[in-house]
Amino acid sequence: MTDAAKLTSTDPAGDPNTLMTLTNVVKHFPIRRGVIIKSEVGQVKAVDGVTLDIRRGETLGLVGETGCGKSTLARCITRLFPLTSGTINFDGHDISRLSPRAMRPYRRQVQMIFQDPYGSLNPRRRIGSIIGDPFAIHGVADGQERKLKVQELMELVGLNPEHYNRFPSDFSGGQRQRIGVARALALRPKLIVCDEPVSALDVSIQAQIINLLKSLQSEFGLTYLFIAHDLSVVEHVSDRVAVMYLGKIVEFADKSKLFGSPRHPYTAALLSATSIADPDRAAARQRIVLHGDVPSPINPPTGCRFHPRCPIAQPICSQLEPALIPVLNDTSAHITACHFPLADGQHLPTGRPSIEQGGEKSAS
Amino acid sequence: MSISELADQPMPAPGDAGAPSGSVLGRSPWQLAWARLRRDRVALACVAFIVFLILVAVFADPLSHLIGWGPTQQDRATGTDINGLPTGPGRIHLLGADQLGRDILVRLIYGTRVSLVVGVAAALAAVVIGVIVGLCAGFLGPAVDSVLARLMDVVLAFPFLLFAIALVTVIGPSELLEIGVIAFFSWAAVGRIVRGQTLAIREREYVEAARSLGAGNLRIMVIDVLPNLIAPVLVYVTLLIPISIVFEATLSFLGVGIIPPTASWGNMLNDAQAGGLYQVAWWFLAFPAAALVLTTLAFNLLGDSVRDALDPRTERLFAK
């Protein structure tokens, strides 16, 4: 795990174009048993050594299956969860160990848009007060001034400012997500973490929200970390894309590189599962169906975490963890963690995984 | 059901950008609950009865003046017959007299005052303590929770009647102590409810959103969690008031609550059973008991109605 981080090819922390650098970020949730005397019986390794850099003004897409640790990573970045280890460098400052008080100025600069537009708005509060929350918490504007600012924001995200006094239940899902966007935008943050902002919405409304996010980005020079499990959405919005599997980044590249020549078998499998609107093309395409479920993050597979489901796994995959480095003849901007990366145009076999679970193998 | 009452139904949204149409007014959850409550006849009857009780308690002095007897005034001439037995309901004493010739109606009126003051004050005190402790236990993490939750368990495990009698015997009975004792034994139940609700609410995404904005614990507890607790707490308050009233009557009945000669429903019942007087003077027992039962019933039924009104799912029951 630590090896992978050390071997990462670039050190973008000093680069002025880098807004945020994650170095080997780890988040383990302890599993406790017992009523009064609690003993730790295990750990959920939700995020297990993620190294990423986010450049100013870009949209970084983060994709992966449900349960791979995307949302946990988002909450680590916004410091809703304390890190188990690793560092987060934001705009030249290490914010990974700051106390809640010291964190406050950075909270203004890193905001979050949540997945569930129904759960993320307090049903008992009026939306004027919800959108005005950032101003109230940071003491930015009061009274009439705050109301004006809130109404400005509402107009900016395409809501009718006259609905200032309504309750969240009066709005549709898309409108609620606009409220969430307005709230995140209130303090003019530098980075907005979008945690699956459109996955709870109808497809027609997804496009509206994505277009809103894009136009706000160009207007305010925002940087997005865009988390999604829908690859077509990510392809539409992102400049660069990171693919996550079981708490680790397995491939990280520019959008065109990643979608054009995926190196990691998992990326290839994900890409083959995207929905295509054209039925003829969809029928002609080769679908790679992965066998089995995502293994438990409590006891992840040894070596490469993908090996129990990988159709091209070799014995070494269960023993040695591949480093996240440029493979084949890729540039340093395209890094992959795989012992047997796919060459351009190479197809994955559709068969069953070729080796057994690594733990059993090494025991024998 | 009129069109405007449909406002809380999820809006069909053909176009996302289209705002809710202007003709439909957005109404707060409280307005909707109030509208539902107003359609509930049982609730209205209960409210009427409770308002009547409050008026009686407030205007006890002029009422007793009107009736012509004071609450502790003994009618030696007509209150008891030649055998010393209390006289029954009639022209002179509308609801009869007690063994000392005191007017039952006037004493009932003053007893209403005691019951309401003690019942409401104790319930409110219990709710304030319970909400604060429950909120802290539910919100401030497992360490605070384990201490406060155990504390609530301990309070709930007390043999309350025994403890109340012992405490009052040691300190000496007074109305304030009675309120304190009742509140002390009621807050833990409120605390448990609030703690449970808080534990659920604190995992909601809007709490996370507030945290990501930089809100502190106190702000989240007051601004985001508390408004979501009001509904269950309000229901519990309307149920806690009759419990406190009965509790007050119990303590007074046992002679550790309101000190005679001040009238309370509890010590009137005690007077009635002392020496088996109720066997010959039924009015002595029946009227205070009826007052207690009706008051308790009114508050309990109102509590049920409030719960139904605050529950959005009951809307379907009213929809026709």
Image (cartoon, rainbow, N blue to C red):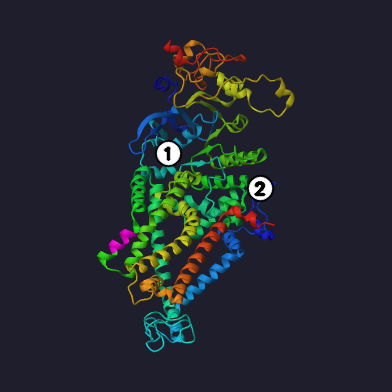
Quarter of the image with the C terminus of chain A is top left
How many angstroms separate mark 1 from mark 2 (CA)?
A: 33 Å
**Where residue B320 sits in the image (x, y, percent)?**
70, 57
Mark 1 vs mark 2: tell me if same chain: no
Name the residue: 51% across, 74% down.
Answer: B52
In this view, the residue in front, B76 or B119, is B76
**The stretch drawn in magenta includes residue B162:** yes
Residue A13 visible in the current orientation: no
Which segment did they paint magenta?
B161-167
Amino acid type shown at disc 1: Arg
What label sits on residue B17 in the rendered view?
Answer: 2
Question: To which chain does the residue with label 2 belong?
Answer: B
Name the residue: 45% across, 75% down.
Answer: B282
Residue at the right extreme, as displayed: A280
**Where residue B64 sits in the image (x, y, percent)?**
44, 83
Badge 2, how many Cα within 10 Å: few under 14, some, many 20+? some
What label sits on residue B208 in the rendered view?
Answer: none
Q: Eyeballing the image, is A312 above or below B9? A: above
**Where residue B138 sits in the image (x, y, percent)?**
41, 47
In this view, the residue in front, B297 or B116, is B297
Q: Eyeballing the image, is B15 above or below A311? A: below
Write down the quadrant of residue A47 in the picture.
top left
**Where residue A17 sits in the image (x, y, percent)?**
47, 32
In this view, the residue in front, B51 or A174, is B51
Amino acid type shown at disc 2: Ala
Q: Badge 1 is on which residue?
A: A79
User: Going by the image, does A315 lie left or right of A173?
Assistant: left
Quarter of the image with the N terminus of chain A is top left
**The stretch drawn in magenta includes residue B200:** no
Residue A20 visible in the current orientation: yes
Secondary structure category for the residue under label 2: loop
Question: To which chain does the residue with label 1 belong?
Answer: A
